[in-house]
Image (cartoon, rainbow, N blue to C red):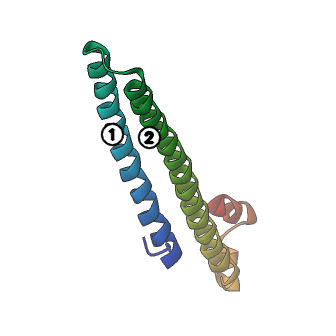
Amino acid sequence: MKRLQMIDWLYLLLGIFFIVLQIFLDFKSIDYTRDITTSIQTEGSIWQILKNGGYMLGCSLLSMVGAVFCGYLFALISARFSRNLRLEIYLKVQNLSMADVKNFSASSLITRTT
């Protein structure tokens, strides 16, 4: 957790927001499905069915956009985290003294950093 920067925490919160938004929209879509079913059973107007269907389609599209943004944000966080971790290891290896370098072979250092 200490390798995450402030912007990463912001991305994490934004990603959680998009997850909650997806859940809300999925549940809202179920409500619209119920309304459509009720309208069909009670011989409601076609416009009411189309209106609820449009709302349901809108919820599904917004949920899909939220999923894409969420995936992008979490991929960005993981890429930044791994970049920072690799940089720390690289700098640590570069700052080894000659006595430390003699204790490790070149292949051992490569294995430890990959």
Q: Secondary structure at mark 2?
A: helix
Identify the residue at the far right of this view: 106
Q: Residues within 10 Å of mark 1 (few under 14, many from 20)?
A: some
Q: Is 46 left or right of 79, judged from the image as shown?
A: left
Residue 19 seen in the current view = yes
The image position of residue 87, as x and y in percent, is 65, 73
Q: Amino acid at mark 1?
A: Lys
* 14 or 21: nearer the viewer: 21
Q: Quadrant of residue 30?
A: top left
Question: What label sits on residue 76 in the rendered view?
Answer: none
* 4 or 60: nearer the viewer: 60
The image position of residue 35, as x and y in percent, is 29, 28
Residue 5 seen in the current view = no
Question: What label sits on residue 59 in the rendered view?
Answer: 2
The image position of residue 78, as x and y in percent, is 55, 59
Identify the residue at image location x=42%, y=70%: 1
Q: Quadrant of residue 101?
A: bottom right
Q: Height in image: 96 above or below 60?
A: below
Identify the residue at image location x=59%, y=60%: 76
Say which label, 2 or 1, has the lower sequence index.
1
Q: Quadrant of the C terminus?
A: bottom right
Q: Secondary structure at mark 1?
A: helix
Question: What label sits on residue 28 in the rendered view?
Answer: 1
Q: Quadrant of residue 83?
A: bottom right
| Measured Cα–Cα span from mark 2 to mark 1 | 7 Å
Tag 2 and tag 1, C-beta contact below 8 Å: yes
Identify the residue at image location x=71%, y=66%: 105
Q: Amino acid at mark 2?
A: Cys
The image position of residue 20, as x and y in percent, is 36, 52
Identify the residue at image location x=52%, y=56%: 74
Q: Height in image: 84 above or below 77?
A: below
Badge count: 2
